[in-house]
Image: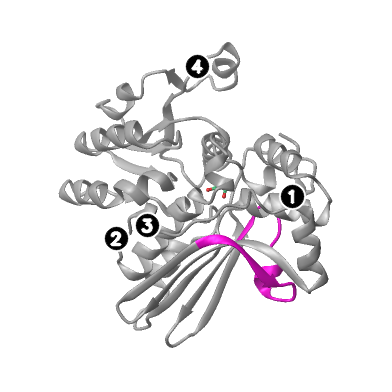
Amino acid sequence: MIRIGMLGFGTVGRSVYDLLQAHTERFPDMQIVSVAVRQITEQRMTLYPTVQFTTNPDTIVTASDIDVVIEVMGGQTETYRYLRRALHSGKHVITANKDLIATYGETLQKIASAHQLALLYGASVAGGIPILDALTNLLPGDETMQVGGIINGTSNFILTQMSDAAMNYDDALALAQRMGIAEANPVNDVAGFDARYKLAILAKTAFGANVVTTQIPTQGIQEINATVLDEAKRLGYVIKPLAVARRTGQELAMTVGPHLVPAAHLLGKIDNVQNAVQVKTRNIQDLVFTGPGAGRRQADCKCGIVRSCDCS
Ligand code: HSE
């Protein structure tokens, strides 16, 4: 039996738990035995009777009977300490935390390798799109020249709702928060910080570059208003939140911010929480990966309108 301890139990954590429960035939030897949460409630204990809840992540990362730690609590410095401790205690680590991987990924990877443990973070960029695996494995013998696209679902959702449903910025952001797609601090999404963490991870994976995230020129979507969106539309464009890393020789140019994209372009048709990562390589030239980049399992959307699901 592989015994899993989870740090955090929000939108993503509960989805992971539900998936494992729904597919016990595929994962017969995996069990989430303990979960660290901020607050232990009666409701939680009733809904998840086989889970041991704790408010102290340390008990999970140091427990002798836990083999794998799944981190979905978010945060950086403190979370980094927990994951360090987990690796030093001999546990494999799985995390979707882009802030943490963009900042401490290199150090955590060294600790994991020294202990012959896995550090997996495939879901940290573009959610449901296996883009890091693709960049690592899909193109042997080829050379990536550019990687990037729409990698923040919340910003894309807000701009889509403002442009197509005439929703105002505040209402669209509030809806994104209710849907569980925005970060705990939504400034990370709308100011472009979430995208630049993800871009740094993409650049590390594609080019082996160690990027200091604060050095990436970054612009948010807060200044975009209905007038700008309408004017773009009149000219045949849409405004999309793009994050792009381009290599020229030894130089790497990176940028995050809203851009005009022709409405007919593939990226112009990527709406709401959908993400799209475009990879340009020397030989294959153009690949585009699209899929849901934020929130829970799309099949859980009970109202059936995944593209603007508000059934949280
Ligand atoms: N807040 C993120 C987004 C969640 O909107 O893309 C997935 O990383």
131 shown above or below 58: below
Residue in front for this viewpoint, 34 or 212: 212
Q: Is residue 54 visible?
A: yes
Q: Quadrant of the C terminus?
A: top right
Q: Which residue is mark 3?
A: 215
Residue at point 33% right, 55% down?
Answer: 212
Local secondary structure at mark 2:
loop
Q: Earlier in the sequence, mark 2 or mark 4?
A: 4
Look at the image and say whether residue 98 sits in the magenta stretch: no
Residue at point 74% right, 52% down?
Answer: 225
Q: Which residue is mark 2?
A: 210
Tell us which disc is closer to us: 3 or 4. Answer: 3
- Residue type (three-letter) at the residue carrying disc 3: Gln
In the image, taking residue 54 as reference, residue 60 lies left or right, namely: left
- Residue type (three-letter) at the residue carrying disc 4: Gln
Tell us which disc is closer to us: 1 or 2. Answer: 2
